[in-house]
Image (cartoon, rainbow, N blue to C red):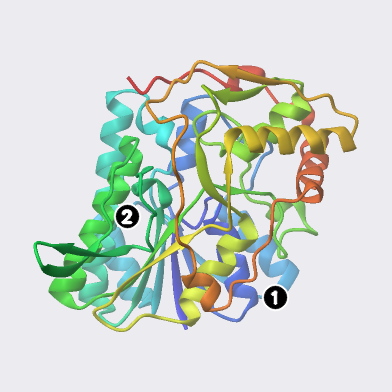
Amino acid sequence: MRVLIAGGDGYLGWPTAMKLSQAGYDIAVADNYLRRNLARDEDVEPLYDVPNLHDRVKIWEEQTQKKISFYIGDFQDWSFVAKLFDEFRPDVIIHYAEQPSAPYSMLNRQAADLTIRNNLGVTANIIFAVKEFSPDAHIIKIGTMGEYGTPEIDIEEGWINIKHKGREHKFMYPRQASSLYHTTKIMGTDLLWFYVRMWGLRVTDLMQGPVYGIFTDESRNDHRLLPFFSYDELFGTVINRFVVQAVAGYPLTVYGKGGQTRGYLDIRDTLNCVTLSLENPPEKGEHRIFNQFVETFSVNQLAEKVKEAGRELEIEVEIKNIENPRKELEEHYYNPVHTGLLEIGLKPHYLTKDVLVEMMECVTKHKDNIHDHKIFRGTQWA
C-alpha cells in the first residue's frame, strides 16, 4: 500500500513515516519546511537541531535498509501536487500539512493570512488531487479537539442526533473554535464533508488533542531520528513546554485560573491512532470522525504532575499563574466521548511520572540550548 504523508517533516509527520515504513508500507513524505521557516523567522527554533528530509531518509535507510521517498514542495502549488500524485499514486494520504499553531495564527494579520491560505488551500488541493489521480484513496486528516470548543454538553464523537419539533436528524457536532487556527480546522472539516457528499470520498477525520512526548519506538536508539521538540509559546504544546520550563528553572506559565481542560495523548498514541485508522478504512462516501485523545487534564493538574516529576530529579519546580493572553473559559464543563479508536484496538499510553521524568532527563541533556526569551512572549488573542 502506498502512503503519502503530507507534512512529513513535522513533529508528527516524520515519526508517522518511520512507523509505517517499519511496518512495510511504501512511504512518501512531502513538505515545504513551513514550520522550520516560521520557527526561524520568529526566533523560536526547537530544543535541538533536526536533520532535513534529505538526511533523515538517508539515516533511516542506513538504520533499517528501508527506503522513504521524499518530495520538497508546497501543497498550495497545484503543479507540485499534480506531479506528486501522478508519480506516486497514493492509496492513503495522511494530511499533516497545515500551519499547526493557534498562538501563531493570532500573532498578527500576516500570520492570520498565512494560516487561512495555507490550511484551506492545502486541504482543497489534496481533495482535488485525490479526485483526479487516486479516486479510491483514503484521506486521513488530522483535525483537532479544539474545533468543538468547550460546550456545556457532552462532546460526541463527530456527530450528534438532534430532535427538533417532532423530527430528528443526524448532524456534524456544532463547532465553536477559540482561535483562528482552530477555525481553519473547522473549515477543513467542512471542505472534506462537502466533497464526501459530492464525490464520495473516503475520509477519516481525527479530532486530536494536544500531543506530548519525544521518543517513539523507531527513534529511541538514534537521536538523529528524533522529532522536533518545540518549547516556545508559539509551537510548543503545553506539556512539552512545562517540562522544558521545569528543567530551565523557569516558573510554569499557567494561564489565568488554570482550569482549562483538554484531552491529551502521547506521541506514540498519535502514531497508533493513525495506523489503526489506515488499517480499518471507512467506506467510500463515508466521513468518519474519531476523537483522538487518551486522558483529560486541567492546566493546573498538568503543572502539578510536572512539579511532582521534578522532585524525582531533585528539580524544584515553581508554578506561576499569569494573566491569560487568550480569550477562553478558564473554568468549564468538559466531557468528550472517545470510544471509536479504543474499539478498533488502541492500547493507550498514559501520562505517568515515569514518562515525565524520562522527558526531563532528555531535555536536561540539551539544557544549554534553552533560551528564556523563547518561552513566553504573551501573544494576545485580542
Residue 351 against residue 252 in the figure, above or below = below
Residue 54: which disc? none
- Asked whether, in this view, residue 309 is left or right of residue 369, the answer is right
- In the image, 209 versus 231, the foreground residue is 209
Residue 65: which disc? 1
- Asked whether, in this view, residue 286 is left or right of residue 235, the answer is left
Quarter occupied by residue 106: top left
Q: Is residue 256 visible?
A: yes
Which secondary structure, mark 1?
loop
Q: Is residue 67 visible?
A: no
At 42% from the left edge and 51% from the top edge, which residue is drawn? 145
Quarter occupied by residue 138: bottom left
Q: Disc 2 to disc 1, how far (Cα)?
A: 29 Å
- Within-10-Å neighbours for mark 1: few <14, some 14–19, many 20+: few
- Asked whether, in this view, residue 75 is left or right of residue 364, the answer is left
The amino acid pointed to by label 2 is Phe
At 51% from the left edge and 21% from the top edge, which residue is drawn? 256
For the C terminus, which image quadrant?
A: top left
At 16% from the left edge and 75% from the top edge, which residue is drawn? 199
* Residue 303 locus on image (x, y percent): 67, 32
Q: Which residue is mark 2?
A: 75
- In the image, 111 versus 242, the foreground residue is 242
* Residue 238 locus on image (x, y percent): 58, 37
Sequence-wise first label, 2 or 1 = 1
Outermost residue toward the front?
166
